[in-house]
Image (spheres, rainbow, N blue to C red):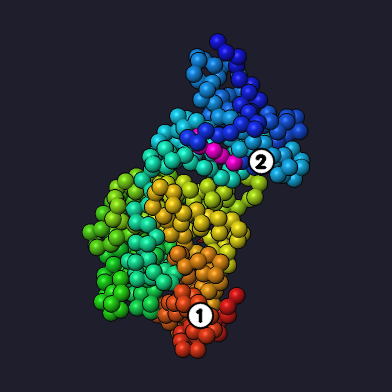
Amino acid sequence: MTEGLEYTGFVEDGGTPDEDELVCEFYLKHVDSVEFDWASGAVAAESSIGTWDPSLTTMRDGIREMGARVVEMDTDAGDGRNDGVARIAYPTELFEPGSIPQILSSVAGNIFGLSEVVNLRLKDVVFPSELVESFAGPALGIGTIRSRVDAEDRPVVGTIVKPKLGLRPDEHAEVAYEGWVGGLDVVKDDENLADMSFNGFDDRVEATLEAKREAEEETGEQKLYFPNITASGDEMKKRADVVLQNGGDYVMVDILTAGWGALHEIRDYVGDDVGIHGHRAGHAAFTRLPYHGVSMLAVAKFARLCGVDNLHAGAVVGKMEGGRDEVVEIYDFLRSDRGIKTTIPVASGGLHPGVVGDVVDILGSETVVQAGGGVHGHPDGTRAGGRAMREAAESAGEGVSVEERAEESEALATALEKWGTE
Ligand SMILES: O=C(COP(=O)(O)O)[C@H](O)[C@H](O)COP(=O)(O)O
Ligand SMILES: [Mg+2]
């Protein structure tokens, strides 16, 4: 019988991950009574095969070899007080193919609560291709989404029906219609709108998809509607059926409040012709603090593997937090070739026509740019707000400033007068 594995037995500093291993990068701060290698080893043990009693890692030969290994420790990468960055390599057999819940229960589970670990942040996860291939991934891909609404040379533009809650189905559909005929490609439900006493899901979807057809008729353009089906797995399937029965081709899921298992379920259920718009409501509970939690980059990787076609990924400008470098890195990942289809990033939160150019300058045109208040708050109403967003998107695609475009567009000029270009 081999020796039991102390936590430091999971450390192989200077080791190199095998190319078929999953690799996690953690920021870690530990208590005074332990050393960085001991704390990193504890994270590796607890997130793979081990526990606090070393003898249990050697119940029989072969188990020890499945243990995760700390292959790099950089204690210069922190604030110099019991902290640093550790990279940990995990043999693939530790993970259930195709299951984000099981992978997260390993590499983003108990380890955040280890008493010797004061702070822990899962900064990045690199998946080996063998694991990537076990996931459905997105159904559509960025190119398909942009071509569906004929937006290959500009960002896709959309709105969120506001007020967030309170409208009846017919009023919701009317707001959506106004946005679409104004020029928007996309209308979505807000993240907390589901099946309400004042706005039943079935009635809303029926009325809004009818409005979409009318707007398509009037504009001669294909439009998209993202109805929010967030609920239990079973209920989401029923709601997806309602969307499809009414001629819809997209659903919206609040992926974090619905949960990864439910997201897997709905991705399998809707198949490869229906888009999934992934909203990230709640992410900032654990993505926001630079020294604790799970990064939005890691969340974006899990979401793309599960198969969201669109993902809110930050806007850099606007009301929501999210530093430029981090957001650009997430956008680059979502658009990169990883052996599964690409996910189109969604910029949203406090945006309006005056900043669409900035969003495109920083994040590019392979983007869905959404504005709620920045459309419906237009002095001349939703239709004019939609027109202003569309003009701003077209000018961004042509490399023309919004100010210049505003000279030919009253709706855009009025938007700039109200909100400026900051
Ligand atoms: O409803 C909105 C935006 O409304 P408005 O345009 O009126 O601010 C979005 O749910 C959040 O901004 C999401 O933020 P993120 O995209 O950062 O997750
Ligand atoms: Mg919202």
Q: Amino acid at mark 2?
A: Val
Q: Quadrant of the C terminus?
A: bottom right
Viewer-nearest residue: 207 or 262: 262
Residue holding disc 2: 85
Residue holding disc 1: 400
Does residue 22 appear in this view?
yes
| Residue 256: x %, y % from top left | 47, 49
How far apart in space, not on screen, are marks 1 and 2 (Cα)? 44 Å
Does residue 262 appear in this view?
no
Q: Kindly identify the residue that appears in the image at 75 percent across and 29 percent down.
A: 33
Residue 24 is inside the magenta segment? yes
Q: Amino acid at mark 1?
A: Val
Q: Which secondary structure is most common in the magenta stretch?
A: strand
- Mark identifier at residue 198: none
Where disc 1 sits, the SS reads loop
Crowding at dot 1, Cα within 10 Å, few <14 / some 14-19 / many 20+, comes out as some
| Residue 190: x %, y % from top left | 43, 63
Q: Kindly identify the residue that appears in the image at 74 percent across and 38 percent down.
A: 82
Q: Kindly identify the residue that appears in the image at 34 percent across and 66 percent down.
A: 147
Provide the residue span drawn in magenta: 21-25
Q: Quadrant of the N terminus?
A: top right
| Residue 230: x %, y % from top left | 39, 53
